[in-house]
Amino acid sequence: MIKLPIYMDCNATTPVDPRVLEKMLPYFKEVFGNAASKNHPFGRAAEEAVETARKKIARAVHVSEECEVIFTSGATESNNLAIQGVARQFQDRGKHIITCVIEHKSVLDTCRYLETGGFQVTYLPVDREGVIDLQQLESAITDKTILISIMHANNEIGVVQPVAEIGRMAKKKGVFFHCDAVQSIGKIPVDMQALSVDLLSLSAHKLYGPKGIGALCVRKRNPRVRLTPLIYGGGHEQGLRSGTLNVPAIVGFGEAIEIAMREMVEESKRIFLFRESLRTQIVTALERVYVNGSLKHRLPGNLNLSFPFVEGESLLMELSEKVAVSTGSACTQLSMEPSYVLKALGIGENLVHTSIRFGLGRFTTEEEVNFVANYVVTIVKRLRELSPIYQVARVEKTRAAV
Ligand SMILES: *Cc1c(COP(=O)(O)O)cnc(C)c1O
């Protein structure tokens, strides 16, 4: 028997892995010290746990020596600290930033805010596949450009950007490169050295760790990236992020990233096969289903489909009874706006409203994939039977064939 509802929204968040929770529990009770209280064993035990987690994170992004890992409240804060921190620190060098139209809101809104303070921001477009054009990026760089902020993989369509090429270009031009790697870490290799990334944002809860903890990895050599902090106080985290550290969450983050690194190759292979099974089952049973974003440059667990001739609202409502999925990103859903990411791909507004994001993850099973495929097919077929425009389109297609 399959357990309902099925969770298939892993780009929004993931459950805490039981192994992660197990490691966290002692840090609520026995090892409850303040990691800043270095004068007694309670504090020192907490500090030790924090430093162990920090090393695991640095190792996961391949920068044990070159980088500082700064703990934050999540990737929203990491993105703010990276962008505002560089902007404030280096504004005498120039006030130009380059980003992309499909970035997460925590990047876009931060850039919008900086524009009100006299910064210029270039928002690079993407092609139909959801990928930026490197030539456009190169010609956008001026002698006033201080920062390029481009995500590794997108949260709505799972499309992976050519980050190594971007990093190489940024390095050549002497511009800092910030990369939001929240969606890619643990799914595909993320190597700050190989990708020439100077600042990297991470979040634990997209990686089977707890919510409310993230990190910004900051290069401290070749080049050293100095930042102006957002939060002042006790001088924690090299003075870049004051505030008592959330030790249990940090321990969980470290464990989550270690497990992800150990199991990534095998897990990604399995999830990719499930994703492809879901996709082929749906597109063979239904005509006119569109995949949004490149299938080639894509995270293994993400599928974003448009179902023309159905009412998006009805589709989601019926689906939601048994399957947790998302239309566009969770954040845009709050305001029920058509996804800006899908619109940026050139997809018409009507079609955007019929789009569903499936996020498969570590705990997705084959039975669930088959159930969801069947369920989606049944609902879409039924809704299309009710759609007058679908009937018209079908008649036209038959005529054209004759
Ligand atoms: C979820 C997400 C964020 C925000 O992370 P939080 O830890 O929830 O603040 C930022 N960028 C991307 C790409 C995300 O998917």
Image (cartoon, helix red, strand yellow):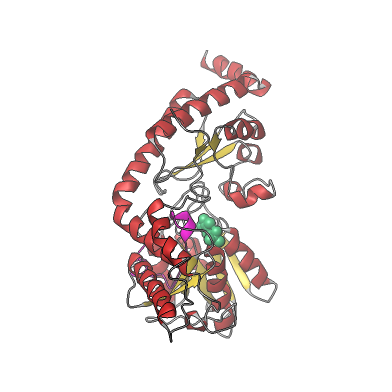
**Residue 284: percent from left, percent from top:** 43, 25
Vertical placement of residue 64 versus 373, above or below:
below
**Residue 285: percent from left, percent from top:** 46, 23
Inspect the magenta stretch and tell me whether residue 95 lies in it: no
144 or 329, which lies in front? 329
Question: What segment is highlighted magenta in the picture?
Answer: 190-209
- Residue 136 visible in this rendered orientation of the protein: yes
Of all residues, the one furthest to the top in this rendering is 402
**Could you tell me what secondary structure mostly forms the magenta stretch?**
loop
233 or 11, which lies in front? 233
**Residue 204: percent from left, percent from top:** 46, 60
Number of marks? 0
Inspect the magenta stretch and tell me whether residue 192 lies in it: yes
- Residue 178 visible in this rendered orientation of the protein: no
Vertical placement of residue 6 versus 346, above or below:
above
**Quarter in which the N terminus is drawn:** top left
Q: In which quarter of the image is residue 338?
A: top right
Vertical placement of residue 108 versus 363, above or below:
below
Vertical placement of residue 103 versus 308, above or below:
below
**Residue 98: percent from left, percent from top:** 54, 68
Of all residues, the one furthest to the front in this rendering is 30
Q: Quadrant of residue 390?
A: top right
Left or right? Give the position of 192 relative to 397. Answer: left
Residue at 58% across, 49% down: 329
Q: Quadrant of residue 368?
A: top left
